[in-house]
Image (cartoon, rainbow, N blue to C red):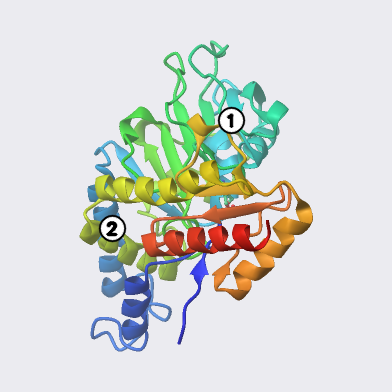
Amino acid sequence: MSRVYNFSAGPAVLPEEVLKEIQEEIFDYNGSGQSVMEMSHRSKVFDDIIKEAEADLRDLMHIPDNYKVLFLQGGASLQFAMIPMNLMKNKVADYIVTGQWAKKAYQEAAKYGKAVKIASSEDKTFSYIPDCSDLPIDDDADYVYICMNNTIYGTVYKELPNTKGKDLVADVSSCFLSEPLDVSKFAIVYGGVQKNVGPAGMVIAIVREDLITDDVLEGTPTMMKYKTHADADSLYNTPNCWCIYVCGKVFKWLKKMGGLEVMKERNEKKAAILYDFLDSSEMFRGTVEKKDRSLMNVPFVTGDKDLDAKFVKEATEAGFVNLKGHRTVGGMRASIYNAMPIEGVEKLVAFMKKFEEDNK
Ligand SMILES: *Cc1c(COP(=O)(O)O)cnc(C)c1O
């Protein structure tokens, strides 16, 4: 049995230790005689799984007591609607558009109220993060919205925007648990888990309690009210039991690795190996402004489409898979999430060096 180095942006690589534990438990989870896929979400055994997952996540992220942790379905994309439905009391929200995911969230919010694009980096194909120190925040904005790490373009906020006292909402899908995050600076932090945490099919929303009310936009479906899920501890209806279980395993793995400070150091080290090479190479180059580079998603190009295609093909054959860039950007993208070992990045760089030599 051999595993590839998987640079997919999502669903993405999971820690091998976690996969092995799951394999061991698939017929009989913890003496229950069933797999987690088969058990009732109302059973004691599952209740322990979801409670422990939440406790471990709270511990890892130091989530303050006045925030609820919700395990929801519909992916990150459903949050694009749930956020305005639950938060747009004045029907005004400010959006900073730094990529396709932020743009989609902005477009969705415009269906429910006045969504205002207060900054954008679309003028340069989203290759940078705009200066957010003094933006024209609306006086009656219900919140300011950002996508923290831009999965497709490979940029990340190194500093949070100055929201002038307004609540900040952040999509952290592709940088979730990659480094410490001060949850208290946000009204809502949410992320689809299939990037850096678990299998596809779930989003974790960390919501400040005062925002969880019955005062939502008229017509909001029951399933799209945060209160519905908060009141039922994420068990209003059948949750994604399997995904919660696997995420719980990943949380334990992260704790064993030393927590988010250690992951940050490790991720910085990993990303530096790739960026240093890109900066020294004569063939490959990174596509975003250096100061805004993501630790998680690294897009790069040769500048020649045919050469890009040749690289992707040969890399795949050599066991480095899913390196093709997003269809809207082209070129290549290496997603180097928590579960990508340092050795995977080192070997990729060695392969790139050889490719450069061979194709001079
Ligand atoms: C992948 C991604 C999404 C969309 O996630 P789905 O779970 O497929 O809806 C949204 N935001 C960001 C930052 C992403 O990386």
**Foreground residue among 344 and 52:** 344
Q: Is residue 311 left or right of residue 211?
A: right
Relative to 134, does residue 291 appear above or below in the rendering?
Answer: below
- Mark linked to residue 244: none
Could you tell me residue 247's position as x and y percent? 37, 62
Q: Position of residue 340 (x, y in %)?
A: 42, 61
Query: Does the beta carbon at disc 1 come under 8 Å from ligand 1?
Result: no
Label 1 SS:
loop
Residue at image mark 2? 254
Q: In this rendering, would 337 be left or right of 324?
A: left
- Which x, y percent locates residue 210? 36, 31
Kind of residue sitting beneath label 1 = Tyr
Pointer 1 and pointer 2: residues touching (CB < 8 Å)?
Answer: no
Q: Quadrant of residue 54?
A: bottom left
Asked if residue 242 is positioned above or below residue 298 in the image, the reply reads below
Q: Nearer the viewer, mark 1 or mark 2?
A: 1
Amino acid, disc 2: Leu
Q: Position of residue 58 (x, y in %)?
A: 26, 48
Q: Residue at x 28, y 45 (%)?
A: 61
Assign a secondary structure to mark 2: helix
Nearest the camera: 276 or 53?
Answer: 276
In the rendered image, the vertical position of residue 140 relative to residue 63, given as above or below: above
Quadrant the C terminus occupies: bottom right
| Residue underneath mark 1 | 128
